[in-house]
Every structure is written in C-alpha cells, then in structure tokens.
Amino acid sequence: MTTFPRLAAFALLAGLVAGCSQSIGNTSDYVAAGKNPQNSAPLTVEQLATKVDCKPKMQVDATEIRTGYCKTQEGEFFVNTFASEKLKDEWMDRAPEYNPHLVGPRWTVLGPLDVLEAIQLRLNGDLHLTDHRVSQTPKPSS
C-alpha cells in the first residue's frame, strides 16, 4: 500500500474512532508543543500546522478528535488533536499499524519517517517508531 492511500485510510479510521469514542474527559491541559503549566490550553490542529508552514485540510472535526491533512515541502502527513490524553492513548492503542508518529501532549502527527524527522524540532514532539508509549527520541544526557 502506498503512502497516500495509507494516510487516507488513517483519516477514515480517525473519524470512526471519534464517532465510537464514549469517554470524554480532560485528563491533561498541557500546551501541545511544550510542557507548560496545566492551566494552558493545548494547541489546535491549525496552530500545530502553522508551526510547519501548512494550512491543513480538515478531515475530521469532532469534539473528541480533530484531524487535518498537510502537504508541505517536507512531504504529506496528518495532524491530530484530542480532547484528552486518555482519548489520545485510546486512539493510538486502536491504530498501532500507523507508525512512525510524533507524539505530544494531546496531539499526534502521522506520516513517513523522513517527513516526521524533518518537522520534529519545530513541533517539539517525541518520535515513536512502534509503541506510542515508548519514545524513540534520544534524551539529552545530563
């Protein structure tokens, strides 16, 4: 399966998960591209996309999940935001075949590895190659 059909299939899966999700809660209030105090609002799909010079084409615009498709000079990818960390984790548990991905507080970005590596620093996300709960991004040594 080529990259674009996989990304399109992902968008469909995101919509299905949003429609089927029963748990709505706010377990985290972090700023998406940085770990700021809990009273800060998370970044939106549009704000994350702006950080990588993209005007997203919205695919899913629901209360629980929002998904935007981006095409930049780096490549194609999807930006997802979630109503809570719990919803993000539940969604990622149901979509393990969509690897690799960047992960931040209440957001994910899915696309080819070379694209994610190109935009990673601008989004300040952790690169996850397989299990979304285990970051592959090297941590600075102390």
Image (tube, rainbow, N blue to C red):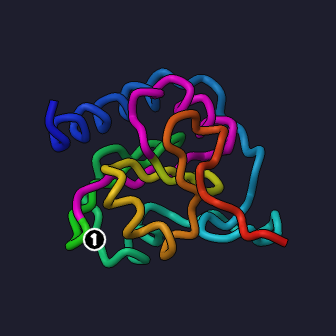
Residue 121 point in image, percent of width and height: 51, 73
Q: Is residue 138 above or below residue 3?
A: below
Q: Residue at x 21, y 38 (%)?
A: 8
Q: Residue at x 16, y 29 (%)?
A: 1
Towards the viewer: 40 or 8: 8
Q: How many badges with numbers are in the image?
A: 1
Residue marked by disc 1: 55
Query: From what the image shows, is residue 14 above or below residue 37?
Result: above
Q: Is residue 59 magenta?
A: no
Measuring from the top left, give residue 140's x and y in whole percent.
73, 70
- Residue 40: x and y, percent? 74, 70
In the displayed structure, 98 sits above or below 116; it is above
What secondary structure is marked by label 1?
loop
Residue 55 found in image quarter: bottom left
As drawn, 96 above or below 45 = above
The answer to which quarter of the image holds residue 19 is: top left
> In percent of the image, x 29 and y 63: which residue is there?
56
Residue at point 54%, 46% (across, down): 128
Q: Is residue 53 left or right of residue 24?
A: left
Q: Position of residue 101 (x, y in %)?
A: 46, 47
Q: Amino acid at mark 1?
A: Lys
Q: Quadrant of the C terminus?
A: bottom right
Residue located farthest toward the front when viewing the structure as drawn:
141
Q: Is residue 98 magenta?
A: yes
In the figure, is residue 103 to the left or right of 119?
right
First to last magenta residue range: 75-100
- The crowding category of the residue bearing disc 1, from other C-alpha atoms within 10 Å (few below 14, some 14 to 19, many at least 20), is some
Q: Seen in the image, is 131 located left or right of residue 51?
A: right
